[in-house]
Image (cartoon, coloured by chain):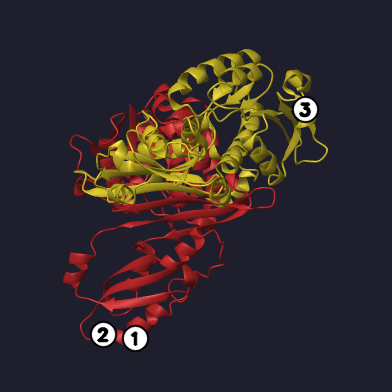
Chain colours: A yellow, B red
Amino acid sequence: MIRIGIYGYGNLGRGIESAIRQNPDTELVAVFTRRDPKTVTIRTEGVTVAHADTVTDYVGKIDVMILCGGSATDLPTQTPALAAHFNVIDSFDTHAKIPAHFEAVDRAAKQAGTTALISAGWDPGMFSLNRLYASAILPDGKDYTFWGKGVSQGHSDAIRRIDGVLDARQYTIPIDSALDAVRSGSAPALTTREKHTRECFVVAEEGADLARIENEIKTMPNYFADYDTTVHFITMEELRRDHSGIPHGGFVIRSGKTGLSGEHTHIIEYSLKLDSNPEFTASVILAYARAVCRMHEKGIVGCTTVFDVPPAYLSAKPYSELIATML
Amino acid sequence: MIRIGIYGYGNLGRGIESAIRQNPDTELVAVFTRRDPKTVTIRTEGVTVAHADTVTDYVGKIDVMILCGGSATDLPTQTPALAAHFNVIDSFDTHAKIPAHFEAVDRAAKQAGTTALISAGWDPGMFSLNRLYASAILPDGKDYTFWGKGVSQGHSDAIRRIDGVLDARQYTIPIDSALDAVRSGSAPALTTREKHTRECFVVAEEGADLARIENEIKTMPNYFADYDTTVHFITMEELRRDHSGIPHGGFVIRSGKTGLSGEHTHIIEYSLKLDSNPEFTASVILAYARAVCRMHEKGIVGCTTVFDVPPAYLSAKPYSELIATML
């Protein structure tokens, strides 16, 4: 039995909680929160909700601590701090800062003799794996990542910070003609604008200047300025009725050449279509939590990523069954 | 530099030879053949063609021997025999016999202290990996493998054995409506006939009884009887002009549920579209040959499969670059 702790109880933490029910070799020991534990109701009977400050009381009672905080401010400090006491796994997703985060977690985990895995999920995570596999197989090629159709939390938040906006939901949408061009094997050069569009559903305050809000969204640097962006103003009721889900997904496609003179073209495509981004991310993390336990049992300490994990470690099934039924 | 030996010089051996040119950290040392080496011309200048009987002269000069024989009669004896002297990799693809082949190779490799990897390629191989990853992530789900559109060598051979047939090419074609049903997340139960059709292009001897040939194909047990099969009689010129390629590919799709009551559906899809089945298979094998070397350096001996290999071992790039650019 793999004893799991959940550190942080938002959408991702709740996703881990429900994924544990689908994996009979895992068991939830405790949920840790920085809120008053009395105010946090979880959905698993008989499981403790404890204050984050008491986490070290659980050393020896938890095999893997799953960190469910945010990449901006929580994980850079929490993952190294908890790696000093537990095997840990997180979904750190600020791609540019992964090397620095890796170093910090690696140092803490090696000192403590624990096993850590960072950046689990689907991107980083399954998409990263597919970029790696495809580029190792077809070195003479080019790969492309497309995201969506799905809700981008960061972009939705950016719209909500605009004066006069009550709530908003932003969808990232891959452009079909760009996907088709990539799948043709022509290895096109695509600008940011040619790969994705952004569609925004915005609830404005009564009497707000809609033209100004729309302009502020469309010209926002980094977030929207480089994309063709559509803005729809809707009511709060419409937002709740039509846009309450958190779907996402995307595509990793590599085209490459083989043959003595590159005469043959191959297309490798991996895609995800997800009804719930946090629940799918949680499902990936739980499989990798199993792998963290196995790596720890094998004496592997320090920080790892999905690139280090033998695939068989992810499955609850015995190796003999895997090679007999899946190979 | 990874020193490679190619054992068997057919389509797959030639694919390995051209893949080596795309991977500057690999080098071809020798090609081994059971034919008279003087009759075999390879496409790499300055490389020895040696008789298979002399292979043990190359112990210490080759880091990984790549076996390019057939699964029916060659690999069951060759892979264990060569594992007694070299690190080896093969593409053994008789799914039902993989556990027995694994045992035989494992015994030989452990006794000799070598590292072996069996069943590399795309199915078994990349498709197996995707079945494993997807089922570990979404335990409450169902997966489907579709093959094609592509040439099935075994089915083409079966047609050629029919009396009155001069040559033939058989294409396996996935049925679009079945793919769409799977992608809808409805987890349909599909019979063999509902998943694929088979299309045959046949060159008959002059005066042969075409109706009899067509009937023999369509009613052939195991190969065609369970499928909707179409037979076209064409000339030898048409066969050479329109059907000389060896394309293949396919799809591994898993749909699964998450959430406390399975309220969210997710689709994971991996697909390949290959201009040349043997060259793509060779490209996968060469990446795994690199991994075999790394596992051997780490002291891992015995038989392994793609399920055992940390993905980072497949890439020629340093780990720090992988996490900075692909994660």
Query: What kind of element bears circle 2?
Result: loop
Q: Secondary structure at mark 3?
A: helix
Q: Examine the image and state in which quarter residue A171 appears.
A: top left
Residue under mark 1: which chain is it in? B
Q: CA distance from mark 3 to mark 1?
A: 78 Å
Q: x and y percent of residue A120 in the render?
A: 54, 33
Viewer-nearest of discs 2 and 3:
3
Report in which chain the residue with disc 3 lies.
A
Task: Report the residue marked by disc 1.
Answer: B212
* Disc 3 target residue: A37
Q: Which is nearer the eye, A166 or B91? A: A166
Residue plotted at (42% across, 76% down): B228
Mark 1–mark 2 contact, CB under 8 Å?
yes
Residue identifier under label 2: B208
Q: Tell me if I can see residue A142 in this picture.
A: no
* Residue type highlighted by circle 2: Ala
